[in-house]
Amino acid sequence: MISNWLAKVPMKTWRWILLAFLAFMTLAGVAIAVRFRLNILYGIPLAVVVLLAIINNFKDVWFLMVFCIPWSVQYEIGTGNAMDFFSEPFMLLFLLVFFVQLLSGRQFSLKGKIYTFHFLIFLLLFWTFFTTVTSHYFFRSFKFFLSKLWYLAAFVYIADRVIQRPKDMKRLFWAFALPLTAVVIIITLKHAAESFSFETAHNIPYPIFANGVAYSATLALFIPWLFLARRWYTVKSLEWYFLTAAVVLVAFGILFAYKRGGWLITLSLPVIYILIQRKVFDKLVYGGVGVVIIAVAFLLYNNNYYYLAPDYKKTIWHEGDLEGHLNATLQGTEISAAERFYRWVAAKNMIQDMPLVGSGPSTFNQVYQNYADGAFATYVSDNPEQSTTHNYFLMTFAEQGFPGGLLFAGNLQ
């Protein structure tokens, strides 16, 4: 009865209803934002438009979310809370889409294939929730758990429905590549104004990237995609020229980010490519894992890791001195490398004390100082940046115990 009546309503009437709804939400959003001094509420009209677009065709909005990722910046929401705008609000919307599809039975089908990858992710998510309940800092861990929900919903389960054909993969690439290239140009111009100095390189990418480490790592991981995309197009086509220029630009960005990890990853890419082509890369990875296990066992035996304790007076930051920075790295006296040992030893002690459930997700910074060993302390061990372990495997074992660490490792298969 009601559906028949709705079907008779003219399309012109629906347009007026929609415009009236948008006008009301705009005025309400502005009024509430002014009243409570919450700038985030000015985005309510945009959120409504995006929600309507998702209802119409969520795939287009998903690619819009990907387009927003390279230039999203962190926005403080209250005390101690932050969100990346505009990417994370999109992820929240896709979490809603995921639940709607889950309840309607469209996300998973009894006849569909459930991959081991999806099952392992579900187990890890369950364990993350369990360790959130047992966390030393429940609300901090709970925020971490919620963020994992919308990341996994958007980039695993919804992405699985969006990326189904080769042309979808190409669309994904361009949705990310175009804004990232623009961001690299902006950051390069900012750095050029500073004469590409080593001293300013770490903070130049802010606020788009938290620091030079995140910037360099992103570019290094994106280079293989650029080379892959060049193979999609004929030589000397417009797309081929653009991608070739992007390769040069990204390599330039990695070079002048002055981050050893980015340099090492980039230089190792040709070797990795050859190993993959010869189908021996996976065997070497397993062999490398075995070597790491043996090395860790040796360091733990009779506390041999104390031989790696730095000389407090010699571990310094060579400010503005790239040559001194590299020499200190080779000599083992560079402060950021030495500080990693301080965090790793603390993580080892946390794992030893809390092997089953850990301290709780996203609590390493709040706990690790209680487990630190003064023999590994450096000038920056007070950790003003609130950085973590510089080793996600160790951090997961420390925060979520052996079950969480093993499940995380299993998800990388």
Image: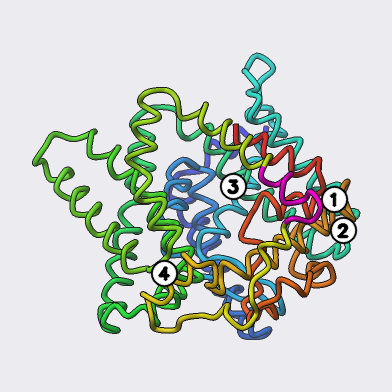
Write the start and end of the magenta stretch as one range.
295-304
Q: Which label belongs to residue 94? A: 3
**Alpha carbon of mark 4 to alpha carbon of mark 2: how far?**
40 Å
Q: Are marks 1 and 4 in contact (CB under 8 Å)?
A: no
Which residue type carries mark 1? Thr
Residue 397, placed above or below residue 249: above
| Mark whose residue sits in front, 2 or 3 | 2
Q: Are marks 1 and 2 in contact (CB under 8 Å)?
A: yes
**Mark found first going from the N terminus, 3 or 4:** 3
Residue position for label 2 = 135
Label 4 SS: helix
Q: Quadrant of residue 6?
A: top right
| Mark whose residue sits in front, 4 or 2 | 4
Residue position for label 4 = 326
**Alpha carbon of mark 3 to alpha carbon of mark 4: how far?**
44 Å
- In the rendering, at what x and y percent does residue 23 appear? 52, 68
Q: Farthest residue toward the top?
A: 111
Label 1 SS: helix
Q: Quick one: label 1, few (<14), some, or many (20+) residues within 10 Å?
A: many
**Alpha carbon of mark 1 to alpha carbon of mark 2: how far?**
6 Å
**Alpha carbon of mark 1 to alpha carbon of mark 4: how far?**
40 Å
Q: Quick one: label 4, few (<14), some, or many (20+) residues within 10 Å?
A: some
Q: Quick one: label 2, few (<14), some, or many (20+) residues within 10 Å?
A: many
Q: Which label belongs to residue 131? A: 1
